[in-house]
Amino acid sequence: MENTKKSVRKKKSNFEKYNRFGYYFLIPFFVGFLLFTLYPMIYSIAISFTSMNGWQSFSDATNVGLQNFITLLTSTPLFMKALGNSVTLWIFTFIPQVLLALILAAWWTNRKLNLKGSGFFKTVFYLPNMIMAASIAALFGGIFGYPTGLANLLLQNLHLINHPFNFFQSVWGTRGIVIFIQFWMWYGQTSIVYIAGITSIDEGLFEAARIDGASDGQIFRRITLPLLRPIVLYTFVTSFIGGLQVFDIPFIMTQGGPQNGVYTLSIFIYNQAFAYRNYGLASAASVLLLIISAVVSILMFRGFRERVNIGGEG
């Protein structure tokens, strides 16, 4: 009996010893997080309450309280325009992205259709997300270039236009290109997330519904979508946060033009910080971006929870 207890204690001691290695492997992450995420975040929040600009150090900057936030919200129309642009681009990107992703996910998980080559097509769908944004911006810049871009040549050959059209001098022309690129880059990832969510649903539910005579459309509306709601919420929140932070495509293509039509919040923050060196205003804009993202995310989660509770009670 005593030998058994000693053996158990020894095994437990060895397990605890080896278990420490898991914590050791976590150290690089926490060090990186503290140095490159948490510290810059706290420092940016501190700067947002100062008049720090140019090559001025933090210790030499004047504390201005909430003045930077007041300036952004009341006397900086470009900030409000950037916020409106970011939300507009996100709406027109997210809605078709989710609709197409749901359709593709429903197709590829439908047992009746039993589509072949799912692995190949998932790779093709996801491939745009793996290409660098700078490369995509250069590619579409060439396609929609003026006057001899591929799009202009094609439209003229089809006799849809008589003269070359300068897409990047049109506000909605530029917005349309940016929206399509963002949609094209991310619909594949959203589709794969939805496919994973649908395949995790108990197949017995679908079989029972089919036995009861439910159609594929009824099964999708009454079973798949309600059970997929948490994943849709996840893509909704992450897409919204990403939409507010979109920077690379509009900046590389037109730097926010024409007429600031695709001038986003991230471009505004970048210009304030690195073009005008107004660090206080740039940090205040970053803090407002964080607050907007947090508030909207909380409202989304709370609305989802209340809807689930109402559905459960009903």
Image (cartoon, rainbow, N blue to C red):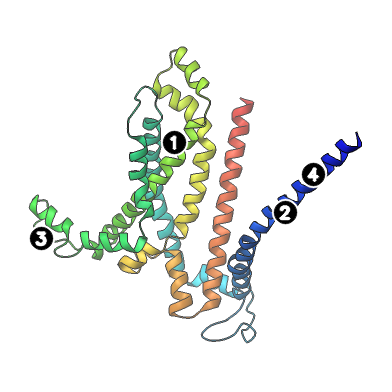
For residue 138, what is the image quadrant?
A: bottom left
Front of the two marks 4 and 1: 4
Asked if residue 144 shows in the view, the reply is no
For residue 11, what is the image quadrant?
A: top right
Q: In this view, does 100 lie to the left or right of 167?
A: right
N-terminal label among 4 and 3: 4
Up-down: is 54 above or below 146?
Answer: below
- Do the residues bearing badges 2 and 3 touch, measured as CB atoms within 8 Å? no
- Do the residues bearing badges 1 and 2 touch, measured as CB atoms within 8 Å? no
Check disc 4 and give the amino acid type. Lys
* Circle 1 residues within 10 Å: few <14, some 14–19, many ≥20: many
N-terminal label among 3 and 1: 3
Whole-number angstrom distance, CA of label 1 to CA of label 2: 36 Å
Whole-number angstrom distance, CA of label 2 to CA of label 3: 70 Å
Which residue is at the far top?
212
Which is more toward the observer, 45 or 26?
26
Q: Dot 4 corresponds to which residue?
A: 12
